[in-house]
Image (tube, grey):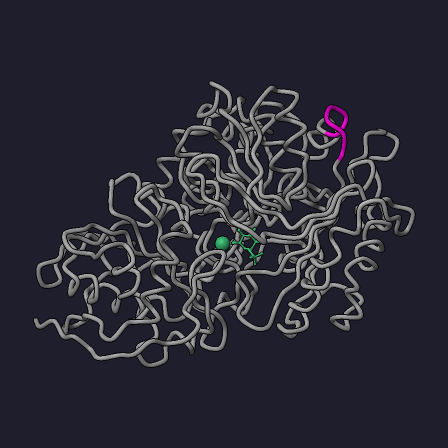
Amino acid sequence: MQVTDVVTQPIDGQKPGTSGLRKKTRVFMGPHYLENFVQCIFDGIGGAAGKTFVLGGDGRFFNKRAAQVILRMAAANGAARVIVGRDALLSTPAASHLIRLNKTDGGIIMSASHNPGGEDEDFGVKFNMPNGGPAPEAVTNAMFARTKEITSYKILEAQDVDISTVGETTLADMKVSVVDPVADYADLMETLFDFDAIRAMIAGGFRISFDAMCAITGPYGVEIIENRLGAPKGTVVHGTPLPDFGGMHPDPNPTWAHELMDTMNGPDAPDFGAASDGDGDRNMIVGPRVYVSPSDSLAVLAANAHLAKGYTAGLAGVARSMPTSAAADRVAEKLGLPCYETPTGWKFFGNLMDDDRVTLCGEESFGTGSNHVREKDGLWAVLMWLNILAVRKMSVAEVMADHWATYGRNYYSRHDFEAIESDKADAMISALRARLADLPGQTVHGLTVTAADDYAYHDPVDGSVSEHQGVRVIFEGGARFVIRLSGTGTSGATMRLYLEALETDPTNFAQDPQAALAPIIAAAHEIAQISAHTGRDRPDVTT
Ligand code: G1P
Ligand code: ZN
């Protein structure tokens, strides 16, 4: 088998975003596109020689072919071993776990997360570090710098490796270990949660519906919820991962997981509903006719984590992304826990977890997780909820009511305006930034601005600074809105408007969040001049 140095040239736009490089699948399938980026990953981490990597993806279109290319390139670049999920499948949290468990030099995850899959949809590649977490900006910047100067890449000329059966094989001098994608992850979950208590609750008639949305968590859900916890067959819905996710948009929110929402709002709703996303790191939690907002879910988990066996010692601290509501902060304050605010994106939590400053982390974008891995983890959140319900013997609605009674209710919503022309979105943000200094003291729709800034993060562990992480405008009484542009979209710009207001009067806890937030929504539109800049009056997706 021969290593070839293929002559190439830089390809524009290979800058990793919030979570790796995401592009249309056809772009990734274009000449040298994947190969260039993979070579730049290896170059950006100081080469692959002698190293061990984990490789897997969410099973979307091009997943298997890309895996074969990456294996040949790893071998050509001198990697010692690649641990690959059978059929190149691994959920993102399972990949993070395998990277840590096997003390590897990192891993390559093929996924565009919750973006639709298929030949005409999205594909993505990201690199995770030896700690199991997404590469930090210093590393992705080094990769990006290489994409602008690359002249050749190394690839082995070889047949496809058989990765359809668990076992050891080789590719030239490189070992290829094909592993069961689920087993190690499921074992980890058993160390964190009281499976006996959950099993007893299920045996007592507690009914669950878990929607895997034809994406990667199907096999994980079947093994853990049905096989190990004893839930009846059919508890996992849409459980077979498909290259196009069966045409579903595997993003667990009320808009895209509408089938689950219909079930949970229906006459014979199960006791607990949950969904996960394309690569298994997101989650949505629903009770019969109760939707748990992700910000609230993080707060509930923080308040109750000590009930699960992996967390009985209590939490070191809690972290949330800046646009996530302050519900978790209120729990942290009451429990006397350190609480951190970071920019959007899981990569910012890694340092805090590695430094033992926090145990739980979460984002409003349906992401919650803990230091058991260095990614957010959809099934972990589902199991944590089930463990809490099993111990507290309460319904989802009762847990929420009790939580709000104790901590108050942070009404919260995110409005997404999708596929805006990029120059219009940029102009809107620039105009807003230019006005920030003048905003304090102004009253808009009855709300007086107390502070307005362009959020910058100073990492307390490594001292790095990340600027321009979202514009935030705070009103008297603590209500606020945040505006930022998405870093994961693949066409045009997506503007995200995050809205929050704290309510402490229990007689006001039963409002519809959109109604409770109406004045802040109006003020945000007015201040940011959303319609004038983008021509949009209403969001495409509301969560
Ligand atoms: C989105 C979410 C963010 C999450 C990321 C990856 O990024 O908003 O919280 O970490 O997906 O799942 P965005 O598109 O906003 O940059
Ligand atoms: Zn995801």
x, y percent for residue 475:
80, 42
Check the image and report above or below for 497 versus 97.
below
Residue 500 is at least partly visible in this image: no
Of the 4 image quadrants, the one containing the N terminus is: bottom left
Which residue sits at x=8%, y=72%? 2
x, y percent for residue 408:
76, 29
Would residue 410 be found to the left or right of residue 357 on screen? right
Q: Quadrant of residue 163?
A: bottom left
x, y percent for residue 56:
33, 57
Q: Main secondary structure of the magenta part?
A: helix
Would residue 518 be found to the left or right of residue 216 on screen? right
Q: Nearer the viewer, residue 518 or 278?
A: 518
Would residue 102 be found to the left or right of residue 476 on screen? left
Q: Nearer the viewer, residue 524 or 122?
A: 524
Q: Nearer the viewer, residue 248 or 500?
A: 500
x, y percent for residue 473:
74, 48
Question: What stretch of residues is rendered in magenta?
Answer: 404-409
Q: Nearer the viewer, residue 447 or 386?
A: 447
Which residue sits at x=43%, y=68%? 123
Q: Quadrant of residue 541?
A: bottom right
Check the image and report above or below for 23 versus 9.
above
Q: Quadrant of residue 73?
A: bottom left
